[in-house]
Amino acid sequence: MSTHPRLEEVAARIRERSREHRRAYLNRCDSSRTRGPNRAHLSCGNLAHGFAACGETDKSALRSGSAPNIGIVTAFNDMLSAHQPFGTYPDRIKRAARAAGATAQVAGGVPAMCDGVTQGRPGMELSLFSRDVIAQATAIALCHDMFDAALLLGVCDKIVPGLLIGALAFGHLPFVFVPAGPMPSGIPNKTKAEVRERYAAGQATRDELLDAEAASYHAPGTCTFYGTANSNQILLEAMGLQLPGTSFVPPGTPLRDALTEAAAARAAAITALGDDYRPIGRLVDERAIVNAIVALLATGGSTNHTIHFVAVARAAGLIVTWEDFEALAEVVPLLARIYPNGDADVNRFQAAGGTPFLLRELLDAGLLFELDTVVDGGFRAYAREPRLRDGSLEWADAAAASGDETVLRPASAPFEPTGGLRLLRGAIGRALAKVSAVRPEYRRIEAPAVVVDDPAELRARHKAGRLPRDFVAVVRYQGPHANGMPEMHSLMPLLGMLQNQGRRVALLTDGRLSGASGKVLSAIHVTPEAAVGGAIANLRDGDRVLIDGEGGRLEVVVDEAEWRERRPAANTATPGDDLGRVLFAFNRAHVGPADEGALSISCGAPPGRGGDKRITETEYDVGRVTAHAPFEAKDA
């Protein structure tokens, strides 16, 4: 089937607005490619340092310079359940590389923090910036000119976007992402949410809550709800950057091990030393970004990607806007219901047909571009699922029908005709709302504002009985410039409990909301943010606020003359324990707005800085900011 006209229109708009930046990016990629292995251009002393710790077999191959050398960039640590399986990967990859006539070395590690551990804690203020640190750490790992391709070992929230941004800075190299797979299913997510809400109401003890959480997060592997980590995996497949059907194969299984070995062999096969060269800078074009957005919308995935994939696009010299997300959401149907926009977890999604079924349905409906990918066989290869037959890895066609239509549906019978994401506009600014998990009767609210600068204050007001029956919780000074844009997930049990009581509640914030949050209407990523004079800072307790998730409106019902006279209120939040925040003062001072990717580094297309303030062309030079004016808040 031909590609849907809307996809063509959006891709064409991205291509046109990005023309000069994309050309400059590709020129940099092409100029970085050298004849023969990069390490052949190192001095003898440089090269000797590079292979000094290798065994004799690998050392001999690296001395000769004729075989591909694969860099491994790993986010392994054993505090993150999703990343703990990566501990055994390097040795397996090295063996597989030798079998493919190549070598492999661990090029470096990148930090990997867990938002599940830092929710509601001061450490969450480092979360978004960790993405940019990961991108920089990836660049450091790859800067030695020892590698002809790389494998990227990462799964979770900021880790995959950071690895991808870092990889795109080395756009002349091929990259293959290698996932770890989900943990076994624990207690149902609905049960876990119910215990959280009972605890928020004072009806469950801490021991009961901890038992429920431990029964949910209980083994190595990715958490099984459909948050940012699992959204990452589907988006990577929709872009053709990891092997088909690999996202949700459990860790520690023969199939998982075979796929890891196949990824190593594939990386060795697509370097510039062979005849099937597939550099990531050419694979990630405007069509690949559109595919990622479509997959996000079709599955009701994490809202964090409305920030991350704007940033990823810029790393490839492409300028993507929230209007592009909005335009695609109008034509992309919702095909999956995975918690929080349903009861099922990713293991049930996988059993129902998983990513191969999903991508096949979108392809047949003309809702994906048929891209060049890291594998042979064109993009249709991603409509096939991996299997082991007599110990050999093979791929078979995706199931003809969904195994469970309460979880995964064909494009001909979607859960909803349009994607579950809305761009909101109005006097308060621009924001995003994920409505796929919100019941239709809760998608619009007009209620008085309860304005706080610290999420803990909202909980304190509830405990003191000082919340109105119906209200919009306005949590401001949570944007990237204010404090690193932490997630507000810790408020969801409280707001969900109040909604269960029949009260009308919603959240309005310039912060983020976890990909695991859903049933309460939330207008998030408000731009401009409060810290740069955004109108959200002008709201006061009792103002009537309208959030219309269906109509795309974000308004304050206040006398027009009075609203014009309003000025931003001061931030009243008390800073928490530092926990490393002092090290990120530069990031907070120079970070761009959420709708431009909240970038605190320069990576391809000229970023904004400080809310809606833009860096001028004279300040932009081949992806680098060459002059910094003092920060000035934009007038309200």
Image (cartoon, rainbow, N blue to C red):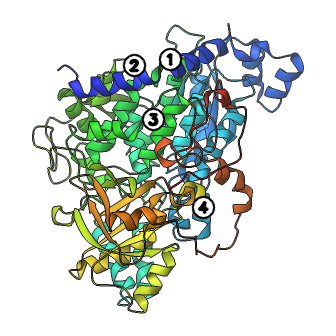
Q: Earlier in the sequence, mark 2 or mark 1?
A: 1
Mark toward the viewer: 1 or 4: 4
Mark drawn on residue 258 = 3
Q: Earlier in the sequence, mark 3 or mark 1?
A: 3
Q: Pinpoint residue 145: horizontal percent, then vertical percent.
A: 73, 23
Mark 1: amino acid: Arg
Q: Earlier in the sequence, mark 3 or mark 2?
A: 3
Q: Is residue 287 above or below residue 552?
A: above
The residue that appears at 41% across and 37% down in the rendered structure is: 321
Q: Report if residue 244 is visible in the image.
A: no
Residue at mark 2 to residue at mark 1: CA–CA distance:
9 Å
Label 4 CA crowd tier, 10 Å (few <14, some 14–19, many 20+): many
Q: Is residue 80 above or below residue 266?
A: below
Residue at mark 2: 372
**In the image, 610: left or right of 405?**
right
Mark drawn on residue 324 = none
Mark 3: amino acid: Ala
Residue at mark 4 to residue at mark 3: CA–CA distance:
43 Å
Q: Pinpoint residue 631: horizontal percent, then vertical percent.
A: 67, 49
Q: Is residue 520 above or below residue 176?
A: below
Residue at mark 1 to residue at mark 4: CA–CA distance:
39 Å
Residue at mark 1: 278
Q: Nearer the viewer, residue 430 or 208?
A: 430
**In the image, 3: left or right of 251?**
left
Mark 2: amino acid: Asp
